[in-house]
C-alpha cells in the first residue's frame, strides 16, 4: 500500500514538471514573439497598424479646360456637382428600406438603382457607399434640411465634365466616361482607380494625361469598424489638369459647319504651311453631355444605335473613292514620269473600249474633243487620263505616286481612330481575288475610282503637298498647353514635316497652274470663280458601287492661288455623301468658306455676296 502511494506521488510530481516545462516554453515563445514584434520589427507593424487605423479619401481633380485658338471661351470645362453616399452600418436596424424610399424621392433616382448599390451584404460596413452622382446643389440642400431623418447619408463635391453648345466641335473635343474594369487592370499602375473619369474620344482621349490633373487625398483616423474617431490628419489638395488651346478657330468652324449644313459629309480647313487644322466638321454630330448625364439614357441608347453613325468623325475615320479630285495627284505623276508631253492632245469622244469594258467620260458623245493635260484637268476628262494610264504608265508607278501623296497611310493627326484609307496594287489584287491586275484596274485608279479609298483629311494633305512644293506637315489640332491657374504658356506645338516628295518644284508649279484653270475655265467655273480671292482646286464625283445615280460630291482646293506669304494660304476639302441624294454641293460649300474666310463674313453674309441658293440640286445631272 505504501509502495502504491509512493508510485502515485512520483507520477504526479513528473506531471507537474512537464506542465511547468510546457508553460515556461509557451511563455518564452510568446515573449520572443512579442520582442520580435515590438523591438526587432516594430517599424513594420507600426506602419501596418497605422494603415489599418487610417482611412484615405480620394479628392477628384478638375480636368483641364479646352479652348479654341483664341483662348477666350472654354469649349470643355468642369463644373461642381455632388455625390451622395450612405454608410450602411450607421442606419438603424430595419430602417434601410424607408431610407432608400426617401432617398429615391429626393434624388429622383429609381429605387432599384439604390438597392443595387446597397445590398444586404454591405449593411455591416461603416464605409460610405456611393448611391448617386451628378446631384445638383439644390438637391443637396434638400438633403441637408432632412438630415435628421436620413441617418448615414453624406455628400461630397465632385467635378463633372460639361460641354457648352459644341455643335460640330463634338468630334474634335470628344467625351469622357468612367473607367472600365478592363481598363483599370492596365491603368492601375498609372494611378487610376475605380470610378475615375477618363477621355473616351477626341482631344479628351488623346491628351487625357494632360487634362486629367492629379487627385488629392484626405486621411482620417478610424476605428476597426471604419468609424471616424479623429479629424483629418493630413490633406493633399488636388491639382487641376492643364488647359489646352487648339488650332481650331471657332469662327471658321461655324462657317464650315453652316456651309455644309445638315448634309451627311465633312469639311477640313487646313493651314498647309504648318499643318494646323483650322476647322474640322463632320455631320451628323452629337452632344457629348449625354455621356455625363445619367438622366439621358434614352438619348445615349439612340446615339449608340444611330444608323447615321453620328459618333463617326467622317473627316478622319470615313473613307471614300477620291473620284476626279485624284486627278491632281495623277497630273503630278504624269509630269514627274514624263509619261506624256503636257502640250500633246488626246481626243475624247465620250468613251473608250478596253477589252470588253466601256469607260465613259462625264461628257458623252461627242465628248470633249482634243485636250492637253491642262485642259483635261480643267474639264475633268476621264478619257484623257484613261488613255495616258493605259498606254504610257505602269500600274506600279501610279501606285508609288499615289502613296507619295500620303494616301494609304496615317497622317498622324493628334486625334484617335484615324483611318489609313487604302491604295490597291497588283500583289494585293492577286492575293485578294486570285486575279491578275488588268488594264481596267489601272484606268479606274487613274480617275479615282476602283478600290482606292481616302479620307477628307488625306485629300487636304494632297492639296497641301502641291501647295508646299512636295512637303506635307503633320496635321494637328493642339496648339498650346497652358497652366490652369496662371494661363502661362508651357508648350507650343511646332510644325513637323510628315513627308517630303522627290518630285521637282517645277512639277508642282505646273499642277498649281492647271488647278487654277479648273476655276477659270473648267468644271468649277460657276461656283468658285469669286472676286474676293483667287482659288485653285478640283471637283470630284465619286460613284457609289452597286447604286445607280448615287455619287459623292468632292471639292479640294486652296487659296490664294498666288501670294508672297505662304502662311495666309488655306486648304479646304469638302465631301457631301451620296446618302443625301444627289446634290452637287461641295463646290458651293467651298465657295462660301473661302468667301467667308477671306472677307471675314459669316456663312449667311457670304451666301448673299455670292448669291448662293439655300441648296442647289442637280437632279440626275453629274458635274465632274
Image (cartoon, rainbow, N blue to C red):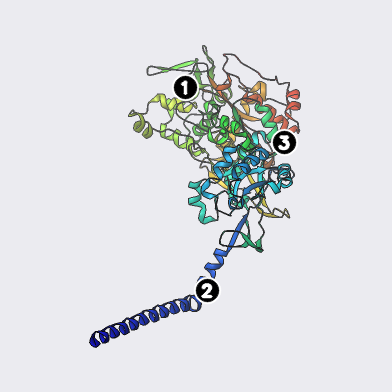
Q: Quadrant of residue 99?
A: top right
Across and down, in percent, residue 347 comes to 50, 18
Across and down, in percent, residue 23 comes to 39, 79
Across and down, in percent, residue 274 comes to 63, 44
Q: Residues within 10 Å of mark 3 (few under 14, many from 20)?
A: some
Residue 464, relative to residue 586: is it above or below?
below
Compute the Cα span from label 3 to label 1. 37 Å
Q: Quadrant of the N terminus?
A: bottom left
Task: Pick the residue in front: 152 or 68.
Answer: 152
Mark 3 in CB contact with mark 1 (< 8 angstroms): no
Lower position in the chain sequence, tag 2 or tag 1: 2
Compute the Cα span from label 3 to label 2. 63 Å
Across and down, in percent, residue 385 comes to 49, 25
Mark 3 in CB contact with mark 2 (< 8 angstroms): no
Task: Pick the residue in front: 551 or 581.
Answer: 581
Dot label at residue 368? none
Tell me which residue sits at (72%, 36%) in the image.
251
Q: Which residue is under mark 1?
A: 545
Lower position in the chain sequence, tag 3 or tag 2: 2
Q: Residues within 10 Å of mark 1 (few under 14, many from 20)?
A: few
Q: Quadrant of residue 506?
A: top right
Dot label at residue 43? 2
Mark 3: secondary structure: helix
Compute the Cα span from label 2 to label 1. 74 Å
Lower position in the chain sequence, tag 3 or tag 1: 3
Q: Which residue is under mark 3?
A: 251
Residue 471, relative to residue 492: is it above or below?
above
Residue 606, relative to residue 465: is it above or below?
above
Mark 2: secondary structure: helix
Mark 1: secondary structure: loop
Amino acid at each position: 500500500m505504501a509502495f502504491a502511494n509512493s508510485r502515485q506521488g512520483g507520477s504526479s510530481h513528473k506531471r507537474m514538471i512537464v506542465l511547468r516545462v510546457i508553460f515556461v516554453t509557451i511563455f518564452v515563445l510568446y515573449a520572443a514573439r512579442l520582442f520580435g514584434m515590438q523591438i526587432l520589427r516594430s517599424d513594420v507593424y507600426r506602419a501596418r497598424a497605422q494603415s489599418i487605423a487610417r482611412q484615405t479619401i480620394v479628392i477628384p481633380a478638375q480636368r483641364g479646360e479646352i479652348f479654341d485658338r483664341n483662348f477666350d471661351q472654354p469649349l470643355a470645362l468642369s463644373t461642381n456637382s455632388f455625390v451622395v453616399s450612405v454608410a450602411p452600418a450607421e442606419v438603424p436596424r430595419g430602417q434601410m428600406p424607408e431610407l432608400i424610399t426617401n432617398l429615391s424621392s429626393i434624388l429622383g433616382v429609381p429605387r432599384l438603382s439604390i438597392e443595387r448599390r446597397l445590398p444586404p451584404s454591405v449593411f455591416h460596413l461603416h464605409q460610405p457607399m456611393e448611391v448617386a452622382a451628378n446631384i445638383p446643389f439644390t438637391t443637396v440642400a434638400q438633403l441637408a434640411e432632412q438630415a435628421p431623418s436620413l441617418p448615414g447619408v453624406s455628400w461630397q463635391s465632385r467635378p463633372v465634365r460639361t460641354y457648352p453648345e459644341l455643335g460640330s466641335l463634338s468630334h474634335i473635343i470628344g467625351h469622357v466616361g468612367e473607367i472600365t474594369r478592363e481598363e483599370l487592370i492596365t491603368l492601375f499602375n498609372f494611378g487610376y482607380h475605380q470610378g475615375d473619369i477618363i477621355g473616351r474620344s477626341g482631344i479628351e482621349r488623346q491628351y487625357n494625361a494632360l487634362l486629367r490633373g492629379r487627385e488629392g487625398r484626405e486621411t482620417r483616423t478610424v476605428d476597426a469598424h471604419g468609424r471616424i474617431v479623429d479629424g483629418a490628419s493630413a490633406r493633399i489638395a488636388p491639382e487641376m489638369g492643364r488647359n489646352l488651346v487648339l488650332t481650331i478657330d471657332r469662327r471658321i468652324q461655324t462657317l464650315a459647319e453652316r456651309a455644309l449644313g445638315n448634309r451627311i459629309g465633312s469639311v477640313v480647313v487646313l493651314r498647309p504651311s504648318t499643318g494646323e487644322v483650322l476647322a474640322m466638321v463632320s455631320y451628323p454630330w452629337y452632344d457629348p453631355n449625354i455621356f455625363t448625364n445619367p438622366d439621358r439614357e434614352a438619348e445615349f441608347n439612340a446615339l449608340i444605335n444611330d444608323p447615321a453613325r453620328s459618333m463617326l468623325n467622317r473627316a478622319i475615320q470615313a473613307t471614300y473613292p477620291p473620284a476626279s479630285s485624284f486627278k491632281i495627284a495623277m497630273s503630278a505623276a504624269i509630269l514627274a514620269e514624263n509619261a506624256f508631253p503636257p502640250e500633246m492632245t488626246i481626243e475624247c469622244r465620250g468613251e473608250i473600249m478596253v477589252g470588253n469594258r466601256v469607260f465613259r467620260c462625264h461628257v458623252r458623245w461627242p465628248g470633249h474633243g482634243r485636250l492637253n493635260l491642262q485642259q483635261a484637268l480643267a474639264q475633268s476628262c476621264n478619257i484623257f487620263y484613261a488613255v495616258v494610264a493605259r498606254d504610257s504608265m505602269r500600274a506600279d508607278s501610279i501606285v508609288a505616286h499615289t502613296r507619295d501623296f500620303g494616301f494609304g497611310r496615317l497622317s498622324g493627326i493628334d486625334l484617335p481612330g484615324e483611318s489609313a484609307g487604302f491604295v490597291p496594287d497588283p500583289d494585293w489584287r492577286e492575293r485578294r481575288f486570285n486575279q491578275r491586275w488588268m488594264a481596267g484596274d489601272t484606268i479606274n485608279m487613274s480617275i479615282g475610282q476602283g478600290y482606292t479609298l481616302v479620307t477628307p483629311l488625306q485629300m487636304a494633305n494632297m492639296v497641301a503637298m502641291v501647295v508646299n512644293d512636295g512637303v506635307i506637315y503633320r496635321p494637328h489640332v493642339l496648339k498650346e498647353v497652358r497652366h490652369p491657374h496662371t494661363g502661362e504658356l508651357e508648350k507650343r506645338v511646332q510644325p513637323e514635316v510628315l513627308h517630303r516628295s522627290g518630285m521637282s518644284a517645277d512639277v508642282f508649279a505646273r499642277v498649281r497652274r492647271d488647278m487654277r484653270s479648273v476655276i477659270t475655265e473648267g468644271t468649277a467655273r460657276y461656283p468658285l470663280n469669286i472676286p474676293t480671292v483667287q482659288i485653285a482646286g478640283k471637283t470630284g464625283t465619286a460613284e457609289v458601287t452597286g447604286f445607280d445615280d448615287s455619287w459623292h460630291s468632292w471639292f479640294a482646293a486652296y487659296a490664294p492661288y498666288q501670294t508672297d506669304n505662304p502662311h495666309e494660304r488655306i486648304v479646304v476639302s469638302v465631301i457631301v455623301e451620296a446618302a443625301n441624294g444627289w446634290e452637287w454641293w461641295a463646290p458651293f460649300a467651298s465657295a462660301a468658306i473661302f468667301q467667308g474666310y477671306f472677307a471675314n463674313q459669316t456663312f449667311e453674309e457670304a451666301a448673299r455676296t455670292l448669291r448662293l441658293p439655300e441648296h442647289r440640286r442637280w437632279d440626275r445631272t453629274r458635274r465632274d
